[in-house]
Structures are given as structure tokens and as C-alpha cells.
Image (cartoon, rainbow, N blue to C red):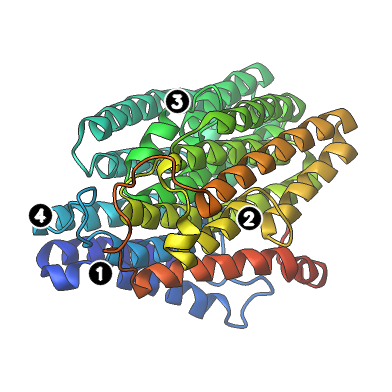
Amino acid sequence: MWTYILLCIPLVGILVTWLSSASIRRWVPVVTTGLNLVVAAFDGFLPKSSVPFRGVFPHLDTLSLVVTGITLVVGFTAALYSAGYVPRDHPSVPGTQPASERRYFSLFLAFYLTMLAAPLVENVVLTWVMVDATALASVFLVDFHHTRKTAEASWKYIIIMEVGGLAALFGTVVLLLGEPAALHDLTWTGLTHVASTISPKLSSIAFVLVLVGYGTKAGLVPFNSWLPDAHSQAPSPVSAMLSAIKLNTAMYAIVRVLHILQAGHEGAFANHALAVFGFLTVIVSTLMTTVQRDVKRLLAYSSSENLGLIAVGFSLGPIGALGAYLQMVNHSVVKSMLFYQSGELLLASGTTEMAQMRGMIRRIPWLGVTLLFGMLAIAGAPPFGLFISEFTIIFALVHEASPWLAALITLMLVILFANFLTYAMRISLGTPSHPLATDGSNYRPRWTTWVPMFSHTGVSLALGTVLPYLLVLSRFVRI
């Protein structure tokens, strides 16, 4: 019942968005996503289960709970940030028109709804429908600014997404045809129970198709060409949701099929295939961060690199899976914060070109300082949470695979750290080498800007300092 309530609240929110006035409309997503958080938190911590949130989601496992929790939290902070970001008077944010705001906030809630539904539905086919619907709900948000660049990015985005969706659908059909008995129970649990009876050849073909299809949606190399264009052209809160939630929902579907093969005869093949794509994604995306000029494209390639690490983690057994779960959470928290900061940088400097953002710490001190911390956090510097999750994945590589592979990942992380530290120092402390589009004198941050940024910073610090102790004392994470 609670699942239906969580999914009905955004539907009501979409209706209210269309019917309400401009002053109310921008707060409807905040109330909607906030209500979902309250519902989940209230029932989840009632003393009815030894595992938090099992009261709300009794049929879900750790993977579903992690992706659902990320969606609930980031969805709320993105809605809060949108409430102050969209209406501000800036040429790149034409949301002051009532029609534009109505379209933005209704599509925002539709996007949120599809991503929330993906890990909540147990049906295999419905999962595909929800993951594919995330692209349909977000393509018009990518093109929200109605420029030539946004139009090109949105067309590229939807075409690649739907091609990936077809591949994932074919993979799902092949998997179901591998065992006719599976057609009587189309749930992920049902497929796992009959995994040993599915033809090994068909299950391998199905996983390759699923990995290509959902991997396209997750931004894995070589299927990630849509990602830097869509992330750089979408409004910043939408970029945050694309990176922090949408990519995870696609990875969720991949791991679901991975678990089926692991329960059958082809677990080793699936692990190796996922690891290959993961390593390729980490290497290519890390190298691409060395030549970026646009801050949002830089963050997009970083998102791809983090999803590659998550893929590697899930291919490495229990220790790697723990690292992958932590990486999912840590990356979502930090990357959404960085996209919020990129929105403020755009409003303050009039551009997302890093060469024209230099000296930010002298022009807008609080923004320059928070950006510096955010860049260090996403680069994996201690004491932020990404350091713990990346260390766990590297440890799993040493324990389950090869020290040489662990050394290769470590080298990539060192390069990434050096790149982000360099970019952070240039933006925060550097001297502008080009005329500024604006000096920032008209920039006026709102409390809806401060709260998401500082709350995400605090959560990232807590994940790096407090969470390790909680994991030792708690049995919440069950792999």
C-alpha cells in the first residue's frame, strides 16, 4: 500500500502544478517530494522490522532500498533548489513566464515519478517501462531553454536513449524466453528462483543486450556520448537528477539481471562483462576530464567515471558490492551538490566556461569556498564519503581480482584527483583571462540555494566520518 501512496503523491502534484498559480506552482514539487520523504521516514522507522524502511517496502532488498532512498533525498533537494533557481531573472533561465514554469515543474515531477517507480516495481517488464520512461519525461527538460544547442542535445539524448531501450527490451525478452516457466512469475524474485533452469547461452545473450541497453542509459563507455551534451544543456537541477538518480536507475536494472545470472550458471561471464565495461568507462571518462572547458561537461564525464566504478564494484562479490552501494550514495550526494553549484556559477558569471569563472572566491567568497570543497569531495579526498567507497572497491579488486587492476584504478583516481584539484584552484583562486559576462553584482542567492548545498556537504562529510562506524555496529547493509 505504501508503495502506491508514494507513487500517487507525485501524480497529484502534477495535477496541482497545472492548476495552481505561479507563486504556488514552484513550491508544489517541494511539498510533493517532501511528503514522500516524510511518509517513508515515518513508517520506515516504526518498530516493525529489524531493518529500517522495510515497513514501507517489505518486498525490497538492499539494492532497491539504496536507489529508492537516493531518489527520495535528491528529488527533494532538487525540487527545493528548482524553486529558487527557475524563477530568477537570467537570460539562460527563461522560467519567469507562467507557461514555462508550468511545463518545467510538471515535467520535473513526471521525471521524479518514473525514477521513483523503477526500483519500487517488482515486475521485470514494468521496470523496463519505468527506466525507459525516464528519458521520455526528461527530454523536454533537457530542451527547456529552447536554443540550438539544447535542441541538438535533446534529439541526441532521446534517440540514443530509445535505441538503448530497445536493446534492453530485446535482452529482457530473450531472458524470459530462456525459461517458459518464468512467464508465470515476471518478478525479479521469480526469475532468480528459476535462474538455474534458464539456458546458459540465452542468458549470456540476454545479459549482453541488457548491458548494452541499460548501459547506454547508465552512461557506460562507449555508449555515453549523450551524457555530456544532455548534462551541459539541461537546467542545473535537472542535470543533478540526471546524474544522481537516472544513471542509478539504469544501473539498478543491470544489477538485477546480473543477480539472475549469478543465481544460475553464467555468473562468471556476467561479472567479467560488467567489469570490462566498468574499467573501460573509468579509463576513458577519467582521461576525458583532462581536456574539458565547460564545468557541466566536466561533471558529466565524472558521473560516467563513477558509474564505471560502481559497475566494477558489483562485479567483485560481497565486498565490491558494498563499495558499489556506498559509491552510489556518495556520488549522488556530491554530484547533485556540484550541479547546484554550477547553476549558481552560471547565474553569477553568465557562463559555464571555466576560463571565465576564475577568481570566484574573491568575487563571491562563499560560492568559491563551497565549490572548492565540492571538487575535493568528488575527487575522492578524505574525509568525504567517496574516499571510503573508492577505497572499498580498490580493496575488493585486490582481494577478488588482481593487484594490477587495483593499481590501474588507483592510477585513474589519482589522475582524476589532480584534474579536479587543478580546475577547482583555477575557478576559485585564479585570475580571469577573459572578459567576464557579468561581475556578479546582480547575483542574489536564496535560502533555497544554501540549504541543498550545505546539507549535501554535511551528508558527504558524515558518510566519510560517521558511516564507517555505523556499518560496523549495524546490520542495515545486507548484501
The residue beneath circle 1 is: 28
Q: Position of residue 342 (x, y in %)?
A: 42, 52
Give the position of the N terminus as an image quadrant. Answer: bottom left
Q: Is residue 112 left or right of residue 49?
A: left
Graded by Cα atoms within 10 Å as few (under 14), some (14 to 19) or many (20 or more), the crowding at tag 3 reads some
The residue beneath circle 4 is: 99
What's the distance in space between the residues labelled 4 and 2, CA to CA?
Answer: 38 Å
Callout 3–callout 4 Cβ contact below 8 Å: no
228 or 33: nearer the viewer: 228
Q: Position of residue 65 (x, y in %)?
A: 57, 59
Could you tell me which residue is drawn at 21 percent across and 30 percent down? 148
Q: Nearer the viewer, mark 2 or mark 3?
A: 2
Could you tell me which residue is drawn at 71 percent across and 66 percent down? 476
The residue beneath circle 2 is: 377
Marker disc for residue 242: none
What's the distance in space between the residues labelled 2 and 3, CA to CA?
Answer: 25 Å
435 or 337: nearer the viewer: 435
Callout 1–callout 3 Cβ contact below 8 Å: no
Secondary structure at badge 4 equals: helix
Which mark sits nearer the N-terminus, 3 or 4?
4
Secondary structure at badge 3 equals: loop
Q: Is residue 172 left or right of residue 54?
A: left
In the displayed structure, 336 sits above or below 128; it is: below
Which mark sits nearer the N-terminus, 1 or 2?
1
Q: Nearer the viewer, mark 4 or mark 2?
A: 2
Answer with the quarter of the image where residue 470 lies. Answer: bottom right
The residue beneath circle 3 is: 225
Q: Position of residue 451 (x, y in %)?
A: 44, 72
Q: Is residue 317 left or right of residue 276?
A: right
What amino acid is labelled 2 in the image? Ala
